Image (cartoon, rainbow, N blue to C red):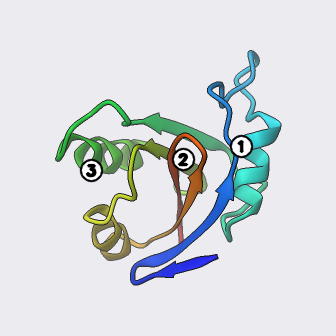
Amino acid sequence: MWPNMFGKTVGPFTAEPEYMAANNQPTERVTALISETDAPDDAPTAQLDVRSLGPPKPLKQTLERLADLNDNTVLLQFNDRAPQHLYPKLDDRGYDFETVETDDTTVTVIWRR
C-alpha cells in the first residue's frame, strides 16, 4: 500500500476491460478490487468511467453521480490518473475513498462515511 495525503492508494491490481457482468452484477475483479479497500463489500455498486475526459469533467461528473446515488452505494470511478483535486471535495461531502492503481487504469472507490 502506498499512502497519500488524502486517503490511501493500494495496488497494484490487474483490471480487465469489462467491469460488470452481463446481468449488471460486479465481476469477480470488481469484487476483489473493492475488498482491497475499506469500502463495504456487500453494498450495491455503481461505476463511472471518466478516462477519456479532460479536467474538470471527471471531477464534475463524479460529484454529480454521487449526488444521484443512494448513500449506501459504492461508486467506482475509473480514471487515467489519481483524482487529486477530487479528494478534498469528497472529504468535505462526507465520503471516504481509496484509489487503486491497476495495470491499465486508476480506480477510486468512493463510499459514504
In this picture, residue 60 sits left or right of residue 101: left
Q: Which residue is mark 2?
A: 76
| Element class at badge 2 | strand
Instruction: Tell me which numbered mark, 1 or 2, is placed earlier along the sequence.
Output: 1
**Residue 69 visible to an observer of this rendering:** no
Which image quadrant: the N terminus? bottom right
- Packing grade of label 2 (10 A; few <14, some 14-19, many >=20) is many
Q: Residue furthest top?
A: 22
Residue 88: quarter of image: bottom left
Q: Residue at x 35, y 46 (%)?
A: 62
Who is closer to the viewer here, 50 or 62? 50
| Element class at badge 1 | helix
Q: Which residue is mark 1?
A: 30
Residue 82: quarter of image: bottom left
Query: In the displayed structure, would residue 107 be above or below residue 85?
Result: above
- Packing grade of label 3 (10 A; few <14, some 14-19, many >=20) is many
Q: Which residue is mark 3?
A: 59
In this picture, residue 15 sits left or right of residue 110: right
In the picture, the disc for residue 74 is none
Looking at the rendered structure, the kind of residue marked 3 is Leu
Looking at the rendered structure, the kind of residue marked 1 is Val
Looking at the rendered structure, the kind of residue marked 2 is Leu
Q: Residue 3, how many percent across, how many down?
A: 52, 81
Who is closer to the viewer here, 40 or 54? 54
- Label 1–label 3 contact, CB within 8 A: no
Q: Residue at x 68, y 45 (%)?
A: 44
Alpha carbons under labels 1 and 3: distance apart: 21 Å
Q: Residue 24, how many percent across, how many down?
A: 70, 23
Instruction: Tell me which numbered mark, 3 or 2, is placed earlier along the sequence.
Output: 3
